[in-house]
Image (cartoon, helix red, strand yellow):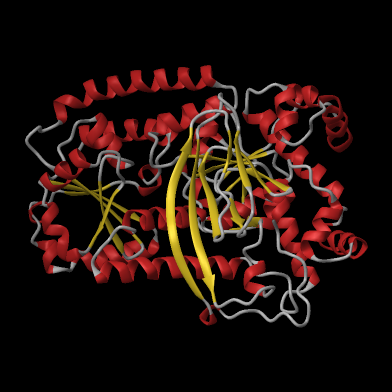
Amino acid sequence: MIKNSTSSSSQQSTAFHSCFFRLIDIVSLEINHLLEIPLNVSLSHRLIIVSEGSGKIHIDDRSYKLTTGGSYSIAPGSKPVIITAGEDQKSLQYLCMTFDIIGAEPGNDLLLRFNNRELMIEPIRRTISTMRKLITMKDTVSEEEQVEYHFRFQKLMYALLKQNRVVSETVTAMQAVEQSISFLMDHYNEEISTRQLAEQTGIGIKHYIRLFKKITGSTPHEHVSSLRIRKAKELLLVSRKSLTEIAEQVGYRDSYYFNRRFKQLTGVPPRVYVNTRQYKIMSMSYVCTLLALGIQPIGAPAYHLGYYAQKLADNITSIGDKSTFYYDKMHALKPDLIISCDTLDVEHQQQLERIAPLVSIPWMRLHATEHLQAIGDLLGMEKQAHNWINEYELKREYAQRRIKPHINTHETVGLLVIEGNELFVLGDRNVGEIMYGSFGLKPPPLVRNLLVEHPNQYGRQVTVEQLWQYEADRFLVIVYGEEAGLTYNQLQRNPIWRQLTAVRQGKVQMIDPDKWIFYDVLSLSGQLDDGMNLLANG
């Protein structure tokens, strides 16, 4: 579970280099039906990591909930039983690694880390990838591959040991409680008593509660209730589940008690909350997409408050810019929901999840109109999103007809963005969505070939020396920011740039960065208008 009880003073932490880990076997298994499967008793250690699905695992007299990404250690001689979630659920897929620890004396710190318990392994995707790689390599015969095989295994074991230290003199009681609070973020919906939490940290229950309140301002029971109700609010906002289903998902087996606790903590019953509340939404990436649906977010990074956002909205609080965020401002706004994209790193996601429920909409995998439809589906505004998209497509068809007489179908057009001191040749996203996708301009040959293999791409960063590979009859250039202006001035003096066909023939055209740098439905709509004027008069 969290970290095991405190070691006695005679137990010394076993150094990694003083033991040898021997990998016996590693396999990937799948269970497709509702089953209760006892695993063989083994005299070796086992590690189970769930890659997909859910269920339970009973190990001797303890029971653990199996969840995707969950990691579980099984000590030698134990009798594990795996139970799948049910026929209506996904199949349960898991990886099982069997290994021995050689050189560890009974009762020491190292063995405690591999008792029957739930383990912490981050990042879980990389760990699963490593284990799958080990499976593909286990039958290798060459000496070089065998060395790599064992090196990967030893590196995995080191990561496990490093993340799963037992509470000892090197870990303070306060740190142990902080670890249990982090544990509750993922296990709030389970039946875990305060006594169990205290036991898992090796701290007396009264001392544990006192430290817990010092860190969180509430008792463990109050903190769990808060986590459950917060998750319930998210599900009420973004799911179509019944109140009974939501109650069970957040850990309440009794829907009546769930209703009572929800009202105690929010002031209104769940149905009133979902039917009457005006949701305060904070956006990390989709300001213009929300505005297209008639929703003004309460806060967003300054980078997303550009030309088209400013035309339709005012009083949106700036909460940072690009990777620099002001979490104190976000807390002060008290959002009900945060809508982001899936490109944020884990640290930023965790910070945001502490403020409000966070929903991530895929960025690169979806077209801008699909962003709109996804958010419409999320907020129960499917019809509004569908109507907006239909109107946009009609406008797009009109723009294609109007611009057709002004296009030279034999001319190639390169799209270049300068941001800071970096150069990007664009593909069929952002500017390329309008110029190539809507207006039918012809990309340079290399870009065209790349898009056949990998459509829906922003583009690629290039050096000045590589620009000749993207030769075109005409260049449209975006210079974004003051530093980019200096970079462009230097570029214009560069002999390589001056030798390009479009440059020699005076066919380099600047386009407005404020209008063309963004990729969202409002910007695309505005870019259709600006593009028609640009090409018709160019």
As rendered, which of 182 and 398 lies closer to the eye? Answer: 182
Q: Residue at x 24, y 42 (%)?
A: 454
**Which of the two residues, 385 or 435, is positioned nearer the viewer here?**
385
Q: Position of residue 459 (x, y in %)?
A: 27, 49
Q: Position of residue 455 (x, y in %)?
A: 26, 39
For residue 343, above or below residue 241 = below
In front of the other: 247 or 420? 247
Rendering coords of residue 497 (x, y %): 14, 62
Camera-side residue: 171 or 118? 118
Question: Is any atom of residue 355 visible in this view?
Answer: no
Q: Residue at x 11, y 68 (%)?
A: 495
Where is the C terminus found, in terms of image quarters?
top left
Give the residue displayed 49% in from the left and 22% down from the top.
Answer: 385
Residue 133 x %, y %: 36, 56
Q: Residue at x 44, y 64 (%)?
A: 23
Q: Is residue 93 above or below residue 348?
A: above
Left or right: 473, with 155 as reference point: left
For residue 295, side relative to residue 410 (left or right):
right
In the image, taking residue 309 as reference, residue 174 lies left or right, namely right
> In which quadrant is the N terminus drawn?
bottom right
